[in-house]
Image: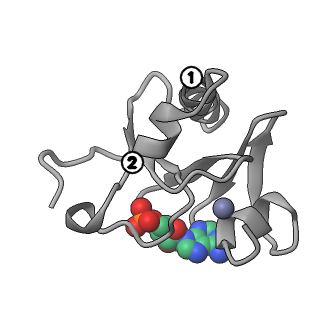
């Protein structure tokens, strides 16, 4: 998608602090972090939201979740705990329409989220 911010990050046309990448996914730090660890995991392939990712072939949703856990390991929060969030649609406040998992950790997280 030519006009998609996260496609541009995947293509390295826009800089990001990349923490991990593999054949199918890319993980980079959120520009406005809400916790000491706040990393976004995206599939390289453009899918608009969690629904589209769930419908994608080839186990892509698995890959995104596996990368989320890898990021937690790399940031040292896998044992202390972390949260994986997909904001999908207006009520969830999704603002970037290339599906991304937020990986949050490094502090005690409140529940329920606002
Ligand atoms: P959402 O509200 O779930 O769509 O989240 C979009 C997230 O993308 C927000 O947490 C933003 O801070 C983050 N974001 C927006 N632009 C960038 C960027 N250029 N690099 C990294 N994160 C970004
Ligand atoms: Zn995209």
Residue 69 picture location, percent across and down: 56, 27
Q: Check the image and report above or below for 54 versus 89.
A: above
Nearest the viewer among 7 and 85 is: 7
Tell me the residue at 53%/51% (across/down).
100
Beta carbon at label 2 within 8 Å of ligand 1: yes
To which quarter of the image does residue 15 belong? Answer: bottom right
Q: Which residue is at 80% across, 40% downward?
A: 21
Name the residue tied to disc 2: 86
Label 2 neighbour load within 10 Å: few <14, some 14-19, many 20+: some
Q: Report the side of 11 relative to 71 (left or right).
A: right
Nearer to me, 73 or 10: 10
**Image quadrant assignment for residue 25:** top right
Q: Which mark is residue 62?
A: 1
- 13 or 17: nearer the viewer: 13
Residues at marks 2 and 1, CA–CA distance in whole angstroms: 14 Å
Q: Is mark 1 within 8 Å of ligand 2?
A: no
- In the picture, measured across the screen, residue 34 lies left or right of residue 36, that is left
Q: Residue at x 87, y 65 (%)?
A: 12
Q: Position of residue 36 (x, y in %)?
A: 48, 55
Q: Residue 71 location, x and y as percent?
A: 62, 36
For the question of whether residue 34 can be seen, the reply is no
In the image, which disc is placed on residue 15? none
Provide the secondary structure element on which disc 1 rests: helix
Give the mark nearest the N terminus, 2 or 1.
1
């Amino acid at each position: 998608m030519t006009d998609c911010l996260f496609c541009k990050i995947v293509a390295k046309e826009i800089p990001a602090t990349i923490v991990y990448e593999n054949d199918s996914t890319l993980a980079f730090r959120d520009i406005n972090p809400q916790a000491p660890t706040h990393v976004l995991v995206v599939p390289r392939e453009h899918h608009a939201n969690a629904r589209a990712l769930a419908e994608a072939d080839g186990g892509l949703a698995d890959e995104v979740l596996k990368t989320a856990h890898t990021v937690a390991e790399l940031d040292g929060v896998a044992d202390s705990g972390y949260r994986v969030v997909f904001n999908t649609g207006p009520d969830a406040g999704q603002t970037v329409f290339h599906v991304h998992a937020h990986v949050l950790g490094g502090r005690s997280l409140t529940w329920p989220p606002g």
